[in-house]
Structure formats: C-alpha cells, structure tokens
Amino acid sequence: MSRHLSTRTRWLLLSMLSAFAALTPQASADTSLPAWTCRASAAYVELSPLLQAQRVEPVLANGFADRANPDTDFCANADTGVQDISLPATGAIPVLTLQSAFASTSIDPSFAAARDQTVIAEGGVLKPLRITLGGLDIIANAITAEARGTCLAGVPTLTGGSTIVSLSINGNVIPIPNNGQAVDINLTPLIRVRLNQQVVEGTALSAEQALTQRAAHIELLAIGVAEPVSRVVIGEAKVDRHGAVCAAAPPPPTCPGGQIPQNPGGSPLVCVRPPCPAGSTAVNGVCVITVSPPCGAGTTPSGTTCIATPTTCPTGTVRDNPSNACVLVVQRPCPTGSIPDPATRVCVLRVAGRDTVSGENGRIGNPNGPVATCGRLAMRFVRGTRSLGSSFTSRFGTRTVTRGKLVTCGANPRPIVRARIDVIHVFNGKRRPKTGLRSRDKGLLTLILPIDLRTRSIEYAYRPNLNTRRVTSRVTLRLTVKNKAGRILR
C-alpha cells in the first residue's frame, strides 16, 4: 500500500514539474561586481529524495525552481501572478492550490551604479492556499513576505518583514505572533513550524551578504534522517549583495602631464596638448618658432620653403590651416563599438539609451505615473449601481452594461489609467476582437454592449506590453439572450 502511494505521489509531482519546465529561465553568463541580486516566490514544495534538487514552485520572480541554484546573477524587474492554480490540474485531489498568488522583484533605478540602487522582493498569496502532501493538510490565508536592500550612509542595509492572517495544519490553528515576531514550533521528530523566519548570511563588512524572509516555513521530519521528508515555504523574499555595492565613486580621470582636457567636464575625457603660441608651430610635440623667407605671389611659407597655394583643393584633400597646403587626410579605423567624431577626429563610444515607452499599456495612479508592468482585472454585469455577477440573462433588444476596474498586482494594488483592454466576443465557434475599451481615472472601466447581441461569452484581457501577447489578467463574462417567447437566441 505504501509503495503504491509513493509511486502515485511521484507521478503527480513529476507531472507538476514538467508543466513548469518550459517556464524556467536560463541563467546569465557572468556577474559584474559589485551587484545586487533578488528573488521572490509565492510558495514552493520540496521532497527528499523524490524531487532531488527540483522544487514545485509555480509562481516565481527572477529565480529558478532549483534547490541548489535558485538565484539569478542580477536583480531585475519581474512581476508574475495568477488568479488561481491547482496542481495537478486534473485527476486526483490537487497537491497544491493557490488563489491570487504573486511574486515580484524590482531594482530602481535599473541602470545606475549599485550604490544608487534599491532592490525589493515580494511574494505571497492574498487568498486561501492549500497544500495536501505526505500526511500534511496546510491551509493559509493572506501571507506575504518582503525583503529590501539599499545603501544608507555608505553602508549596505538589508531588511525584511512578513505578515500572516491565518494558518492551520491538519485542522490545528497555529497562533499568529504580533508585530511580525519570529516563532519556532519544534515538535521533533514529527514536524517543525517557523513563522516570520529571517535568515541572514554575512555582515555589512563581509564580501557578500544575503537576507531571506519567509512568512511560513513548515518541515515534515523523519526519525533518524537529517534531511526533512518534505519542506513547504509560503511567501519568500530574498535580497543579496555581491561585492562592495556601497563603495564611493572613483575619482574622475585626469590628463597626464603636459596635456589638457579638450572638453572640460565632458564625457568621455579627451586629452590634447595645449596650442602653440602665435608665431610657432608644433613639431613632434614641441612648439618651434619658424622664420620663413618672404614668398612670392601665389605661394605661402611652409617652414623654410615657399609652396604654391592652389585656389581649390583636389577631391579627397583638405586645406591645412597652418601651411595653407592641400593635404590628404586618412581616417584611422575606430575600435569595434565606437565611431569617429568629425569635429575632433576622436573615436567616441556611444551608449544607446533605453526606450521605456515602446509598447507600454497604462500608467500607475495617473497619466504621468510609472509604467504598469502587471495588472489585475475585475469585470461584471451591472444594472444601475447593482452588480449582476459574471453571468446574466437578458431579452433581445435590451442594452446591457458591464463595468470593472484595473489595478496593479501585489499586496498594495493601485489603479492603472489609460490602459487598453482586449475585448473578444466568442460565439458559434468564432472569436471576434473588439476595440475601444480603455481604463479611466481610478482604473475604472465601462463597456455598453450593443442591443442586437445574441448569446455569447465576452473575454476581457490586459497586456502590460502591447508588443507582446503576455496577459497578466483575463476575465470571461457569460451573456445569455432570449426572445420574447423565452427561447435562447444563439
């Protein structure tokens, strides 16, 4: 009997892993120090030795579902979330059930010295979560964890905190501490429960430092085995630093002796020799006073020689001002990645700026707020101020109104304004896209349907980037239309 259950559990978990294998990002090649790293997870499950180094971790930001190497090389802006998810999706009782799960990481500003950046990681679930595994039945509600890293007065500072509304294990309600206080309930050799756990590695003086904040950490123990049989973490946020991220800026470069900046205060620094005084010319870097004999008409002095002065220079040559002679100018090739500056004949490295507007779909709070990267959509049928829900039956020729709201993901939702919503009518096996629905102030949405519609489904979807097909929130309303005789019109 136990062998059958073990085989069945292995099959369920392996199927869960394969469902998320395609979503696992690839690690970057190298890390340029100093740098911040970050990671956030709504929840994950580990089994030893069944899953070995793998985790079941469906909602993850800027990381990998890998016990040995879960972190990326850099912190990056990432935001993911789901309305609800069950694993496995079909078949037996789900092992993992999440509602309104989210995970997000951010680094601000994205392109700057590490000493000027702040990194934040957040993860958790806003609605009930359930995990049924190996004799454990865990039910949690409104659990979040946050970690933050920044430089304060030139010192790296890592902080974290978590919140828990309710938690029960096998029907036993776990007391929740006040003010985020850490609690360790150690019932060796059966189970260990840690709430508001904070794991700190290194110090402000060490080469590396990390802080991991876990809202709930549950381990199912086994007699005589060092590694827990199963480990469940709900709400995890982690920030790290690698190298001296808060080190002061190096002094600006200076020109070597005998040279001066060609563009004082400019970038890049270009050093040149100072110009020679009037009556002298530069010869091999030395100013030399040249006494020239008087030259005849149509000639100009060049050192101790008189040369003819052409009225126009041949193609491919330019006039040299000191000698008034036509000279051939050969431009040396610039290194890869740089281009010649025609005014100074200096190779200049140009760094392209990032276009932060292309593809954006809505701003947070107001039209001039930050660009939205993840949104949550709510839509319903209404009559006046009364909500009619997501399914509604109307009579043909009657006008129907739908209303809703678009807000940001995470524990502190804010309205997204001037965002375009994709609207698709689905009927008789056809999908017909419609346009024109945008969010107003406070993220509000209103769509009045035509009076000649027949029975159909109406899908509303939000894409943060209009250049991609990535949807962070989708709502489907069901409209049933009947004629005067009460017959459904399709």
Image (cartoon, rainbow, N blue to C red):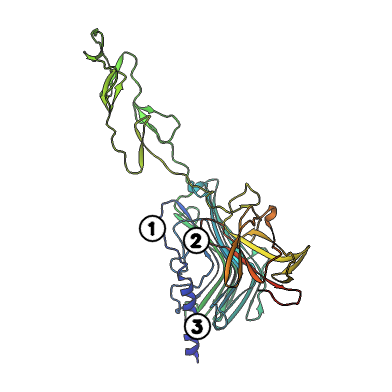
Q: Secondary structure at mark 3?
A: helix
In this rendered view, identify the residue nearer to me: 97 or 231: 97
Where is residue 373 drawn, in percent x and y? 57, 56
Image quarter of the C terminus: bottom right
**In the displayed image of the protein, which residue is found farthest to the bottom?**
1
In this view, 412 is above or below 49? above
x and y percentages locating residue 41 in the rendered image: 54, 66
The residue under label 2 is 62
Q: Quadrant of residue 452?
A: bottom right
Q: Which residue is mark 3?
A: 9
Mark with earlier residue (2, 3): 3
Q: Residue at x 35, y 21 (%)?
A: 275
Mark toward the start of the polypeptide (1 vs 3): 3
**Helix or strand or loop: what does disc 1 sit on?**
loop
User: Can residue 182 be seen by looking at this rendering?
Assistant: no
Q: CA distance from mark 2 to mark 3?
A: 28 Å
Q: Position of residue 96 (x, y in %)?
A: 56, 76
Position of 53 with respect to 220 (left or right) is: left
Cα distance, mark 2 to mark 1? 15 Å
- In the picture of the structure, the residue carrying the numbered disc 1 is 29
Q: Is residue 294 left or right of residue 464?
A: left
- Name the quadrant containing residue 453: bottom right
